[in-house]
Amino acid sequence: MERKTETGTDAGTGTDIGDKIILNANTQVTGAQTAAVRDAAKNLHRDIRKAFCRTQQPGCQVRLENGKTEKECFWIGVREGALVIQASDELGFIYGIYEISRTFLGVPAFWFWNDQEPQHREEVRIPDGYQFRSKPFRVKYRRWFVNDEVLLHTWMVDREKDKPWEMVFEALLRCGGNMVIPGTDRNARKYAALASGMGLFITHHHAEPLGADMFARVYPDLIPSYDEYPEKFHGLWKDALERQKNEKVIWNLGFRGQGDKPFWADDARYQSDGERGKLMGALIKKQYDYVKGMDADAVCCTNLYGEVMDLYQKGCLHLPDDVMKIWADNGYGKMVSRRQGNRNPRICALPEKKEEANGIYYHVSFYDLQAANHITMLQNAPEFVKKELEQVLERGGDDFWLINCSNVKPHVYYLDFIAQLWRDGDIDLERHRKGYVEKYYGLEEAGQIAERLKEYPLYAAAYGKEEDEHAGVCWMVWKEITRVHFTGRERRGRSI
């Protein structure tokens, strides 16, 4: 991929304007000051070992220095015989380290998930005078939600059970993410420390306010009713605050039922929208007061998801002014409320006021027991996704993007696509598709593979009349589609 620098030189091409700085197997990273930055530096050393042959030739230093940059930004340049990264904060250094891995070593964000190793070579020469300065991200908080993690649960990498999760968080950082929901229920607690230690903010699932244990988990023999056991709910919330008080957290507030359902499914005494919204609003305010009592500068958000969106749009749910509103798509990429069984009101879920803090919860993977795609790519086209996310940006939804990434591997194309949007706010679809294929599959059949990616959504079965109402494409069907194309046989129809 072309890299524009302040000197106008593409560092990846080795343009000869005085090549003096050499990256090779003997290159060392120095100056890392925090554990998270040291972790990224360790990964760069791993990439160096993979990318270079052994040599007796000395390699330059990659030196980390504090510098005046914008938040989460970095400057990379050649100075005093070293390749220097300057940044003013932890994530700036981490992003700069992974930029060196990508630009000079050829290690892209999803190398692990696409089973890719860097080209083996003796050295890379960097033009004397090379420099590159990153730009601020278009979206402030950029996170993944690791969902459907049952597909990661029993997998070990290098005989390490936590390694797949570590590789999830590394890929997120390489994509410029800064926040994560590290799984659900027990996994969220288990892997929060790992994610936080790698430099990521932690936030919470919409059914687990404040990251607290679910009531039904702790009290399985009790009816999960706030009216009957208010002190037990409050105890769970306070325990969650105490457990996470030393971590970087965006606090999710809310009151849904046990699991992914309305709270009144467990407590039938709340029959009207007014009663439901009143209780939910009161408990969100109580959680808000707990958080602000601990940290007056804490950032809070709440998910307008499913039935919560319905209550909010009807004027039944009132929120503190500075709580960030997270608007959610319906699971299929359309910014309308999700269906619950056969009820599908499709309430508009786009931010309303630019002057307020707004974000989105968006699915590239969705598992609703009806037309799921959690083990295949999103069944709606990138053109459709781009249109929806551009509307989000136009309506002021640039404070917070939460992307349901499921178990990552089936969804890397769309995750890469969205990462460019949250970085730049815009994307050239054809250029991205071509660049993605060349990056991960090489040049030989890049054109054919890019065409197959473009045609993929055409084979999704429609389950309704709306543009987004397509079922996930079965892997075996997709395998047959690609086999037919690559063997030159006649194209088949779109029906499945």
Image (cartoon, grey):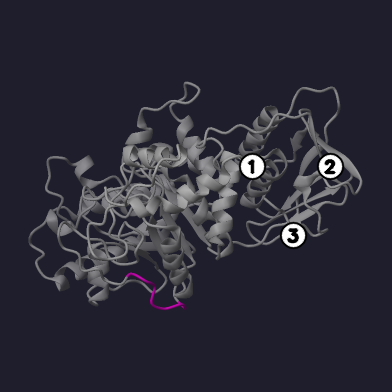
At label 2, the amino acid type is Ala
Image mark count: 3
Main SS class of the magenta portion in the image: loop
CA gap, disc 2 and disc 3: 19 Å
According to the picture, the residue beneath numbered tag 1 turns out to be: 37
- Taking the spot 33% from the left edge, 44% from the top edge, the residue there is 374
At label 3, the amino acid type is Lys
Task: Give the number of the mark in front: 2 or 1.
Answer: 2
CA gap, disc 1 and disc 3: 18 Å
Secondary element under disc 3, as helix, strand or loop, is loop
- The image position of residue 475, as x and y in percent, is 34, 39
- Which residues lie in the magenta part? 349-355
- The image position of residue 75, as x and y in percent, is 74, 54
Secondary element under disc 1, as helix, strand or loop, is helix
- Taking the spot 49% from the left edge, 63% from the top edge, the residue there is 297
Instruction: Tell me if residue 403 can be seen.
Output: yes
Q: Residues within 10 Å of mark 2 (few under 14, many from 20)?
A: many
CA gap, disc 2 and disc 1: 18 Å
According to the picture, the residue beneath numbered tag 3 turns out to be: 68
Task: Give the number of the mark in front: 2 or 3.
Answer: 2
Which label's residue is closer to the chain start, 2 or 3? Answer: 3
- Taking the spot 53% from the left edge, 54% from the top edge, the residue there is 419
Q: Residues within 10 Å of mark 3 (few under 14, many from 20)?
A: few
The dot on residue 82 is: 2
Instruction: Tell me if residue 357 can be seen.
Output: no
**Does the residue at mark 2 contact the one at mark 1 (Cβ under 8 Å)?**
no
Residue 63 found in image quarter: top right
- In the depicted view, which residue is nearer to us: 2 or 399? 2
- The image position of residue 427, as x and y in percent, is 55, 62
- The image position of residue 163, as x and y in percent, is 48, 30
At label 1, the amino acid type is Val
